[in-house]
Amino acid sequence: MGVVPLTESFVPDLKITPREGGYARGQEGLEQILYAALNILVEQGSKALTLRRIASECGMKAGNLAYYFPSKEELLRELLNAIISSYEDAFDVIVHDPAEPAEKRLERLVVLILDDITTKKTTRVFPELWAMSNHDPFVQERVDELYQRARVAILELVEEINPALPANEREIVALFISASMEGMTTFAGYEKPWREQMPAIERIAVKSFLHIIHTLKPGEIGAMTGA
């Protein structure tokens, strides 16, 4: 049985914002560094992600790389921003499509995210970030920010489908939906055992998420937790 083809549009690896006052050659160097860092995360893992290794991948000296990024933290900040910015653009196209009802847009968003999980980049990069965040408060803050930004699209659709839900309950629902999809990375991601079943998983996810959003009543989540 062959690999099931993706059904949604491709999410670009990075969206790199030009630095103010930058010139073409400087921007090319910046992009080269960030793509090199991403490639190291994908192919070698977070332990290999050092400024020296990144400089070597770019064919430059560590001192030259410091011209762009004086510290690893600054490089990680810009790399994660470039990663999430590419998703924000892809999500925005779906969420603000005036031609489709909110339920259909949520379906498209879920399929896009789960399809993306099956790619080599996403399957390998995000677990590396999770592992780094367990031991590095700086990375933890960046990962939290990344997922908060990613959940904005889900939040908008939850509010549109069930506007009666209060803001704090919409946040919990959006977190649940996001975490449910991200959890599939280990099982149905790139070269994982359940990869070929992702289309079936997508159908289950869409049906269950829509049911939850439609049927939840204001205050019901608080009643479940005793809050």
Image: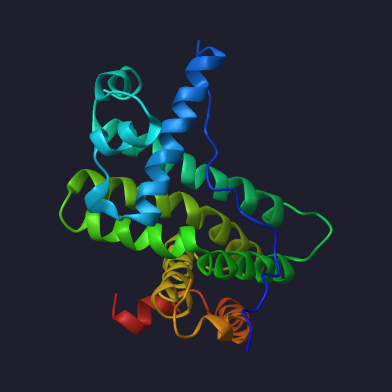
Q: Quadrant of the N terminus?
A: bottom right
Q: Is residue 191 left or right of residue 53?
A: right
Q: Quadrant of the C terminus?
A: bottom left
Give the vertical position of 97 relative to 89 (above or below): below
Tell me residue 88's x, y (percent): 57, 47
Give the vertical position of 148 relative to 168 (above or below): above
* Front one among 18 and 50: 50
Q: Is residue 151 left or right of residue 98?
A: left
Please give the name of the residue rendered at 54% of the width and 48% of the height, measured from the top-left corner: 13
Please give the name of the residue rendered at 40% of the width and 55% of the height, measured from the top-left corner: 42
Tell me residue 202's x, y (percent): 60, 80
Give the vertical position of 176 relative to 125 (above or below): below
* Front one among 101 and 110: 110
Please give the name of the residue rendered at 70% of the width and 56% of the height, measured from the top-left corner: 94
Residue sitting at the far right: 99
Tell me residue 33's x, y (percent): 41, 32
Q: Is residue 189 visible?
A: yes
